[in-house]
Image (tube, rainbow, N blue to C red):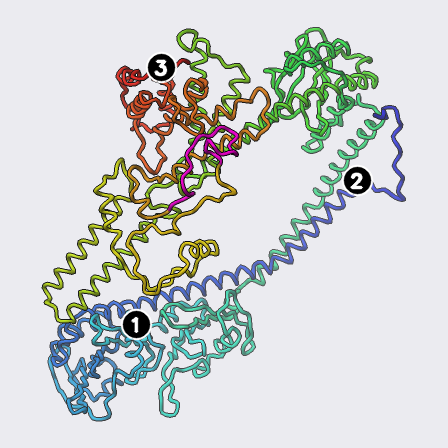
């Protein structure tokens, strides 16, 4: 390493001209303030104007929403009235009783809805009935009503000879008939009217486009809907006159104008005094337009914004600036309307121009007042930076003893001054320490020995080594010599280091030097802190260079040992991630791979602490305990290959999904077949009572059979021979398949179907209600067939398992006839295969010597004491105690787990009782079970991982008597 301690610092090249920093900062401050003032003055007008425009837009939008709400309130009662009339049976039965119709049905509806100008009913035979209140003179004149007439009922009846008869009935306000007469002229057919045809195609209220009523020439809409029976259409005419009055009340300025129009400019409502009326074109009334009203500003707005926009539009009309906006109008469902809103700009903006001038004057005055302050502040900052620059120049000349720049109110300058103080005392301390260390494996003992030699070699007073820890921002004390621990309180280095470079102790002034211990990759491994007397010897470059050479090897040794620790932690983390991934793979076994290791370690530590009894000689050193802990975490690592649909199989027919739904659909087909047969029998003349009885009997049989099949699908403790026989009888029932079952399949499914069924049957084909089809069977792939049978030459790990005839059998009867639980023989092998995969995976890893038994401990927890376990049928006398512990805790966790789909969680007493019988049956080690039963381990586990409802009273002695029924093998 090159030593440039005494090399002179090269001079920077001189520039042609350099400006003092205080002048630059002060000038920039003044210019910036002036620029900000100009920008603020320029933007004040635009910001204020934009605010007024935004406010105007909000007001216009509120007007649109209020108008839409008013429209909905006008139409909603009419819709409710039509819905009520559509359900009224008198609409169909009282066509020839006009007075009763008036009194009981139509007149009350009109009285409750004053905006309705007419109610009418069109019937399927072409008859027509309408009721109108005679409120305006145009309507009375059109029908030549008597003076006291208040209502008019008009009827149109189609006679048997095809002619029509149209009659008018005039009633007073008390519903008394005043006059009646026949109406001459060509009677229309209501069935040809748009309101009739559109309602026949809908089940709800239909709203027409706005149009001009022929009686009073008002603008309105028609509402219609079919009656509940579908024999007639009821309708109502609603005028939109009140919309214009509502728009007039929403004007945002005296000259503001609002108009509700169609997309083509036809006028529906207007805020001005000249309300829209019909326009005659070729003798026919039509909707007025904006040009017809001479509303130039609105007409220009409509042409400027043909589609509704989200912002205000500025335009000129008749030499005046206007602000306008167009909004989509959704007040009348199904109609594409828009609301146009416009107002003169001068009425909206008001005194904004005068306000702008006031803002300019105020801003200019403030700028003039603040300019001296900006100049003084810039000069002050410049002076501080000049002093810091001068100090840095002196430090570059190796002058680290000069005092700081003095007090300042600038936080950054003060912090920079403090950093420079720290650098003055420690700049020579960031070098490598070089000393060869011995082979001491414990890092604490190694650091203590090296630190002692380092302190003595440098003739320092004391020293301390602090090591970093991942995830923490502080350093922990690792070694001290000659009282170095007292240098820092509590043995923890502060979060923000380095510490002050000097301090005082009882012997007089001293200095503390801190060295970084960095790895070859540059990571901070720790700190070396040395305290020495303040003398020229310890402040010379030679001292720092010498110390640097000594500490280099210390840093490398720390790195090597921490690397070994990191490798161990990485292995632990990988194993933990694998266990968590297995738990996360299935929502029904989540937490199993985490709970089993914790319970296993608890029990192993409890046994290792025994000093008497059958396990007094059992002990685990650090390596053996670590080996056992890894095996516990990896005991189910083979489940990563287990299919989820088998692990999570909650019903017998479940594969990827529960196939009971397919079978239920077949029963649905048979149900409908029975109905079809019933109808065919009736058409053939069979007695109705006999046919209905046969249909009901068939339906009842289908319901009972499906209920039985569904119950069998749940799975239970035992399925009887009678139940299996009934399943086979049900399976003999057939249903007709009319669709090709070979289309829509994947290539693999097609190939499998072609092998199992070379010649498809002709359609329709009779299919059994429940079937075991050849395509349900998934054969073994010879290249990937598990080598688990004893005589298999590929079996190199000592497996001793029976291989099912096929990999999977998804046959419906095959699965439904499972006698116990939900798993077939093939499913059970797929689950047991996780132990095969566990052992295969773990034996392929290059385990070090002290972890060589991890595969056996992890893979033997499903072996039994009687040698009937799996995957290798190892008898109990060949199982070590750690393997028996794994077997016991795996069973206990499985029994008490509350996340399994195929069983409810068992209580403590139930779980321990089952385990007692498992001991008696040669499954578990009775001696180990008795120790577990009488230990506090299971209760501690229950409090941490079991639900409160599962924790009940346990009669340990009664359970012990059950377990002692088996011979106790040697530990």
Q: Which residue is mark 3?
A: 968
Q: Which residues are magenta?
A: 787-809
Q: Is 805 displayed left or right of 133 in the figure?
A: right
Q: Which residue is mark 2?
A: 21
The local crowd at label 1, few if under 14, some if 14 to 19, many if 20 or more residues have their Cα within 10 Å, is few
Q: Nearer the viewer, residue 279 or 487?
A: 487
Give x and y (percent) for residue 554. 72, 18
SS for tag 3? loop
Q: Within the magenta stretch, is there residue 795?
A: yes
SS for tag 1? loop
Give the mark toward the camera: 3 or 2: 3
Give x and y (percent) for residue 867. 40, 24
Give x and y (percent) for residue 925. 37, 19
Q: Visible in this render: residue 579? A: no
C-alpha gap between disc 3 and disc 2: 92 Å
Rendered-image quadrant of the N terminus? top right
C-alpha gap between disc 1 and disc 2: 83 Å
Q: Which residue is mark 1?
A: 202
Give the mark toward the camera: 3 or 1: 3
């Amino acid at each position: 390493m090159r030593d440039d301690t005494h090399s002179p610092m090269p001079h920077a090249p001189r520039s042609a001209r350099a400006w003092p920093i205080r002048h630059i900062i002060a000038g920039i401050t003044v210019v910036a303030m002036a620029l900000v003032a100009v920008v603020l003055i320029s933007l004040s007008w635009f910001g204020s104007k934009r605010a007024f425009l935004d406010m105007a837009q909000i007001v216009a939008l509120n007007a649109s929403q209020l108008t839409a709400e008013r429209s909905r309130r006008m139409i909603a009662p009419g819709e409710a009235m039509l819905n009520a009339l559509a359900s009224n049976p008198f609409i169909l039965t009282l066509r020839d009783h006009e007075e009763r119709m008036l009194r009981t049905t139509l007149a009350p509806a009109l009285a409750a809805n004053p905006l309705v100008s007419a109610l009418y009913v069109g019937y399927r035979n072409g008859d027509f009935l309408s009721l109108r209140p005679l409120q305006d003179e145009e309507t009375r004149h059109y029908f030549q009503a008597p003076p006291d007439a208040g209502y008019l009922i008009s009827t149109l009846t189609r006679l048997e000879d095809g002619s029509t008869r149209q009659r008018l009935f005039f009633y007073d306000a008390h519903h008394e008939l005043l006059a009646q007469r026949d109406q001459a002229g060509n009677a229309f057919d209501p069935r040809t009217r748009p309101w009739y045809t559109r309602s026949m195609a809908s089940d709800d209220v239909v709203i027409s486009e706005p149009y001009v009523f022929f009686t009073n020439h008002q603008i309105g809409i028609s509402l219609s809907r079919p009656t509940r029976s579908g024999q007639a259409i009821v309708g109502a005419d609603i005028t939109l006159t009140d919309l214009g009055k509502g728009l007039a009340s929403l004007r945002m300025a005296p000259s503001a104008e609002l108009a509700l129009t169609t997309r083509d400019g036809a006028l529906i409502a207007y805020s001005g005094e000249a309300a829209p009326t019909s326009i005659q074109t070729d003798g026919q009334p039509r909707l007025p337009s904006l040009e017809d009203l001479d509303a130039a500003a609105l007409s220009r707005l409509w042409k400027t914004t043909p589609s509704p926009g989200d912002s205000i539009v500025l335009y000129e009309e008749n030499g005046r600036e206007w602000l306008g906006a167009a909004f989509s109008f959704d007040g009348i469902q199904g109609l594409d309307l828009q609301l146009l809103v416009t107002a003169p700009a001068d009425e909206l903006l008001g005194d904004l121009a005068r306000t702008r001038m006031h803002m300019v004057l105020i801003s200019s005055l403030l700028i003039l007042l603040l300019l001296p302050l900006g100049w003084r502040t810039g000069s002050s900052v410049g002076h501080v930076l000049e002093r810091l620059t001068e100090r840095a120049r002196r430090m570059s000349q190796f002058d680290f003893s000069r005092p700081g720049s003095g007090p300042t109110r600038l936080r950054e300058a003060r912090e920079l001054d403090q950093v420079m103080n720290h650098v003055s005392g420690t700049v020579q301390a960031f070098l490598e320490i070089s000393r060869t260390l011995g082979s001491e494996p414990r890092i604490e003992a190694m650091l203590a020995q090296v630190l002692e030699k380092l302190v003595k070699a440098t003739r320092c007073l004391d020293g301390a080594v602090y090591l970093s820890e991942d995830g923490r921002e502080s350093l922990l004390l690792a070694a001290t010599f000659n009282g170095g621990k007292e240098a820092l309180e509590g043995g923890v280095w502060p979060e923000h280091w380095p510490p002050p470079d000097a301090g005082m102790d009882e012997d007089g002034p001293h200095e503390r030097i801190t060295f970084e211990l960095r790895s070859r990759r540059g990571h901070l491994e720790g700190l070396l802190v040395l305290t020495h007397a303040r003398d020229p010897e310890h402040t010379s470059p030679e001292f720092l260079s010498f110390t640097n050479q000594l500490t280099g090897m210390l840093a490398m040794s720390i790195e090597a040992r921490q690397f070994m620790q990191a490798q161990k932690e990485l292995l632990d983390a990988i194993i933990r991630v694998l266990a968590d991934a297995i738990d996360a793979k299935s929502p029904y076994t989540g937490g199993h791979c985490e709970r089993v290791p914790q319970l296993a370690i608890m029990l192993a530590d409890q046994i290792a602490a025994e000093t008497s009894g059958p396990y007094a000689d059992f002990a685990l050193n650090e390596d053996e305990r670590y080996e056992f802990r890894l095996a516990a975490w990896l005991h189910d690592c083979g489940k990563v290959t287990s299919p989820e649909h088998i692990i999570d199989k909650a019903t017998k027919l479940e594969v990827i999904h529960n196939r009971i739904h397919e079978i239920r659909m077949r029963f649905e087909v048979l149900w409908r077949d029975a109905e079809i047969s019933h109808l065919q029998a009736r058409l053939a003349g069979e007695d109705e009572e006999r046919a209905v009885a046969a249909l009901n009997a068939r339906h009842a049989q289908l319901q009972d059979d499906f209920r039985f099949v569904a119950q069998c699908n749940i799975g239970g403790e035992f399925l009887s021979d009678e139940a299996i026989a009934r399943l086979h009888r049900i399976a003999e029932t057939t249903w007709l398949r009319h669709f090709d079952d070979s289309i829509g399949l994947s290539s693999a499914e097609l190939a499998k179907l072609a092998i199992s069924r070379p010649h498809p049957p002709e359609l329709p084909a009779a299919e059994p209600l429940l079937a075991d089809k050849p395509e349900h069977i998934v054969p073994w792939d010879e290249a990937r067939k598990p080598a688990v049978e004893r005589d298999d030459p590929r079996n190199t790990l000592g497996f001793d398992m029976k291989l099912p005839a096929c990999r999977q059998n998804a046959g419906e009867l095959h699965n439904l006839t499972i006698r116990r639980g939900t798993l077939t023989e093939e499913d059970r092998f797929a689950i047991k295969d996780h132990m095969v995969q566990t052992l295969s995976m773990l034996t392929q890893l290059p385990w070090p010597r002290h972890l060589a038994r991890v595969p056996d401990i992890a893979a033997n927890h499903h072996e039994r004491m009687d040698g009937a376990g799996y995957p290798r049928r190892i008898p109990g006398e060949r199982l070590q105690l750690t393997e028996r512990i794994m077997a016991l805790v795996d069973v206990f966790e499985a029994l008490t787990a509350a996340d399994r789909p195929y069983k409810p969680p068992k209580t403590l007493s139930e779980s321990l009782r089952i385990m007692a019988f498992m001991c008696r049956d040669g499954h578990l080690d009775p001696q180990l079970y008795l120790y577990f039963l009488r230990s506090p381990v299971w209760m501690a586990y229950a409090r941490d991982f079991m639900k409160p409802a599962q924790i009940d009273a346990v009669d340990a002695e009664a359970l012990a008597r059950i377990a002692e029924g088996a011979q106790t093998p040697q530990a």
